[in-house]
Image (cartoon, rainbow, N blue to C red):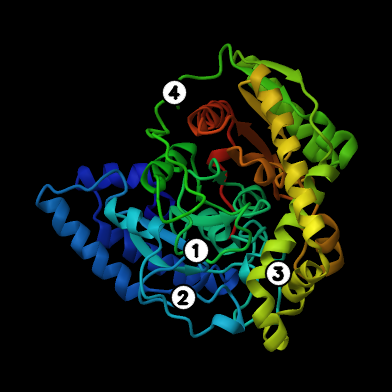
Amino acid sequence: MTEPHWLTASEASKAFAAKKLSPVELVQALLTRTEALDPKLNAYIRLDAEGALDAAGAAEKEIAQGRIRGPLHGVPVGVKDIIDVATLPTTCHSHILVDNVAKADAVVIQKLRQAGAIVMGKLSTHEFALGGPSFDLPFPPARNPWNPDHHPGGSSSGSGAGVAAGLFPVALGSDTGGSVRNPASQCGIVGLKPTYGLVSRRGVFPLSFTLDHVGPLTRTVADNALMLDAIAGHDPADPGSAATQSRHFGRMLDRGVRDLRIGFVRHFHETDMPAHPEVTAGLEDVARVLQAEGAEVRTVHLPTLNEFSGINRVILCSEAWSIHAPWLREHPEKYGELCRRRLLPGAFMTAGDYVGAQRRRLELIASVEDALRDFDILLCASSMDPSSRMDDPAETARTYPRQARSPFNVTGHPALAMMAGLSSGGLPISVQFVGRYFDDATVLRVAAAYERATPWHTKRPPIG
């Protein structure tokens, strides 16, 4: 059997059923690996070893009794530390909330527990899901398992690093401008920002009500579909939640891409924001692979990245300021420098700026909708560069905004990022697939076809 720490959620579930492994044995193996590797990675803010072992013991007893809650029964999961887990602190990686203990589970945690999943603990993030890799916070920043001298992407940084390093098979993150897909891109795993409204955000500390999503990070596309099956669903107490019947997101994973029409948004990485040459080559190779698998791939044009990112910035800064203004006025010193700097522009944006951005947002949504009438899926860049070094803040500041993820927070379409190769420096490069509203299943279908046709999902970081 595969080493326990490299088992996917699907493989772990099969191993439990075959009595080759128990949930307690898996959790113990992951705790041992965490003890060895996490001092180098800082993926965890709070490891709940006792709680995880207790939950694993309960899951093991249920298996013995023939009571299986679902495909995630006994599967360990890591949780970004802006998502409430009852009795554990939700610190948002900030001095401001360092003693904030959650009284109840977020809806997504309730759903994971109902599916039998085991919460391993709370994971590093950028402060309030907005800052960057920072050293003036109460906990150290997470590092990239492909090279711990480099950052792992963010803001779901611990989620990406931990999944890629084999500390847990699956994790939850949040995505407001790309914060699930960025760590997926930089850590060489699969990260999905579901359709806006598909997954409840109740119990998740907000950054921008218009743009916030919660999504899964996994090592395989099949595991991503399993996670989405578990967490999706209407929540009438979340004003952004959609009353949709979308479910069974893995139902088309084995159907391939024959006869699908894929629109390649080349101008994002060719002219709007010229990508690193190895990223450009990787994206062209993705197009060739999908064509060889039977898809029709043609170039498509959308508004420029600058338009999308500008609208994202105005909406995000305005809404984030409305959330943080009281704390920023009373205790600005409790924020890390980077997060404080990113929040303050919201103080200077007017109602006219915000309303104008929301109006333009509707036009940008219409442009993507027009493209998706002609194409089943859009293909584009995620990150324009491999991850930069942690000790080079200038390069991190330069490369971090060089991405094509925020357009689909503005529009709310489902978007998935996954590994598409390794740079000459041994760091992951990535691709992004975007689909129609509530057609997350087709996004996963295309990603699964690409995964089968390439070796990247079999690669492991050299950390251990």
Give me the C-alpha separation between circle 1 and circle 3: 17 Å
Are discs 2 and 1 less than 8 Å apart at CB?
no
Q: Residues within 10 Å of mark 4 (few under 14, many from 20)?
A: few
Q: Residue flagged by tag 4: what amino acid is it?
A: Asp
Comparing labels 4 and 1, the label whose residue is closer to the camera: 1
Q: Earlier in the sequence, mark 1 or mark 3?
A: 1
Residue located 69% across and 28% down the image = 286
Q: Is residue 236 shown above or below 152?
A: above
Report the residue marked by disc 3: 321
Answer with left or right where residue 326 lies relative to residue 161. right
Answer with left or right where residue 85 lies relative to residue 258. left
Report the residue marked by disc 1: 204
Q: Can see residue 141?
A: no
Give me the C-alpha separation between circle 3 and circle 4: 45 Å
Nearer the observer, 69 or 301: 301
Give me the C-alpha separation between circle 4 and circle 1: 33 Å
